[in-house]
Amino acid sequence: MRSSFGETRRLRPGVRIGLWLAPLVLFFCGGAYACPGSAPFAAPQDINLTGGGQAAETYSAPAGSAIIDPHISLCPPPAIAAVNWSLAPGAGCSAASATSITCNSLTVTIPPNGSSVDKQVTLSGSMPGSPALFSVTVSNAANPANVASRDYAFFVSSSGTGWGDPHMTTVDGVRYDFQGAGEFTALLDRETGLEIQTRQIPVATTSLPGENAYAGLRTCVSLYNAVATRVGGHRVSYEPNISGVPDPSGLQLRIDGALKALGDRGVDLGPGARIVRLDQDGGIEIDYPEGAILVVTPAYWADQQKWYLNVTVSNTTARSGILGALAPRSWLPALRNNQSLGARPDSADERYAQLYEKFADSWRVKDGSSLFDYAPGVSTGTFTNASWPIKNPTSCGLRGEPSANPIDGKVAEQLCRAIEDEHMHADCVFDVSVTGEPGIAKTYVKTQEHRPGATKVTVTGSRETTAVAETAVFTARVAQTRLHAQKPTTGAVQFLVDGAKADSPVALDAEGEAKWSTASLSIGRHRVSAEFVPIAGGWGVPLLTTLSPQIEHVVSANNDLWRWLLILLVVISIVAAVWLLLRSK
């Protein structure tokens, strides 16, 4: 991508700048200048006046993300009397005054020239809803030749998902089903060249699924079977054994066509680009230099001898493809040529023709553009079934394929009970019901666990039992479920006793822990849990609220009181016995 200021570069994902004026606001950033002798990326010291020159940075975050007073500072702070700042608005920004510019919802303010105190540019507001470009220049007032400048590009990032019998969520949040069969471009960023391709295979079932609410069509189903992408200048594929022989041992990872074993440390593919293993079942994460994160969660269906998988993409600026944004005034994403299909047709036949013929064919992968790996004699055409899903089907059988039997919806509901998101839960129940494959529910659970921002909360007590009025101490620990998460866990924990809030939320410490103590629990058994409360707003993938499992804590009567009462009773008994003995004489 090239801005009006010259070449801009995307920043490495996972490396973030901590903002000392707003330590809870995180940028996706990499390659920013760090003062010699200071911790890398410890502060947003982006402009090096001493060295001068020009550089460029690109930031991305979901639209509407809060920007809580971050700033751009000199590095190192100059020991000079006067520093001059200037701003140059680019695309998406305009000059509001001599000292500030506006970029939709973002305001950029410079200090007055000649100031010896204010040596920073302040940003406030929220992430612009459309691309915003501007330039910051700083110079030594006493030596105008000593100049440094930096170009800043802000882009909206989004998430897109495809899981189960492919239920799609576009990067602008629209949910629809796409049951096509073949290889398709799921996401394409025309600026950066990022592309993710997915393979979908038809699934024979003895049941005919109900009508999809968004498209108003009743169709047979398919499943994701493989994924391929370009990352860091490399072509990466993750697919079943290309020999075509069913192989339950695992999916095959290839980088530039070469089979690659993925160890515990993963594989680096250049600055900001890597592939890491998420679990022992074949889940992987692919990080892109552009900041996007692709998570693939696979499973093997033994009865069908097929691999299937879920695909989630986070923090991407890609807007085109099957998971792309809807075209203007259209019910579907734009075609590859950016053409809009317009409003949803009233006719079911026309809806089928648009979705499974025109739209599907537009985004089908061609032989010359495929990122997948194939055995000799195999091509993308081998996997193309343009007549799937069947139009107006009366059955969902496939010649030569065993048909999967459905299971009762109540059983599916129980298998999917751990899925928290309402829409994801409904999709899980649908998929398990139609296919009869319980493993699909487990794949949904893993997809939920591997979501960027997903958290897990556990609670422990210093003791299982305390006496009444005795202090009980509980510790909640919050951790991100992704093994390779790099964003620090910030926020607070709300402790709950028997389902009710107990006192105010407790802030997490640097270790992701929060402690709560109380001496006011009543006698009896109590259920103690904790809910993670992330900081609202912020940059990057937001952390998700999570409720911990409950632990039991017992409060007994005061043991010391009972002990003294018992002693008193014994003394009284002895005194009474002696008195009776003496009286009897």
Image (cartoon, rainbow, N blue to C red):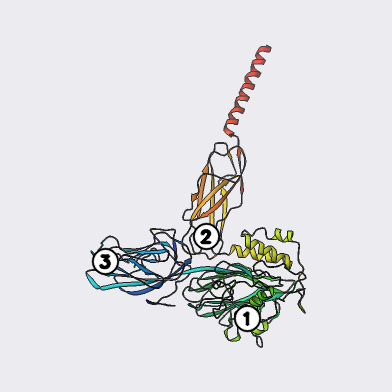
Q: Nearer the viewer, residue 471 or 583?
A: 471
Q: Is residue 240 left or right of residue 68?
A: right
Q: Earlier in the sequence, mark 2 or mark 1?
A: 1
Q: Give, as a three-letter code, the residue at label 1.
A: Asp
Vertical comparison of 272 with 337: above or below: above
Residue type pointed to by label 3:
Val
* Relative image position of residue 42 (x, y in whole percent): 39, 63
User: Quadrant of residue 70 in the image?
Assistant: bottom left
Q: Quadrant of the C terminus?
A: top right
Q: Quadrant of residue 20?
A: bottom left
Structural crowding at the residue carrying mark 2, measured as other residues with C-alpha within 10 Å and reported as few (<14), some (14–19) or many (≥20): many
Give the spatial CA distance, label 2 vs label 3.
39 Å
Provide residue 314's location: percent of width, then percent of height. Answer: 54, 68
Q: Residue at x 54, y 75 (%)?
A: 320
In this rendering, position of residue 114 left or right of residue 404: left
Is 141 located above or below residue 561 in the figure?
below
Q: Which residue is mark 2?
A: 543
Q: Is residue 482 above or below residue 340?
A: above
Q: Position of residue 302 (x, y in %)?
A: 73, 71
Neighbour class for label 1 at 10 Å: few (<14), some, many (≥20)? some
Report the residue marked by disc 3.
83
Q: Are marks 2 and 1 in contact (CB under 8 Å)?
A: no
Looking at the picture, tell me which residue is in the foreground, 267 or 550.
Answer: 550
Residue lying at the far left in this picture: please name it. 142
Q: Which residue is mark 1?
A: 361
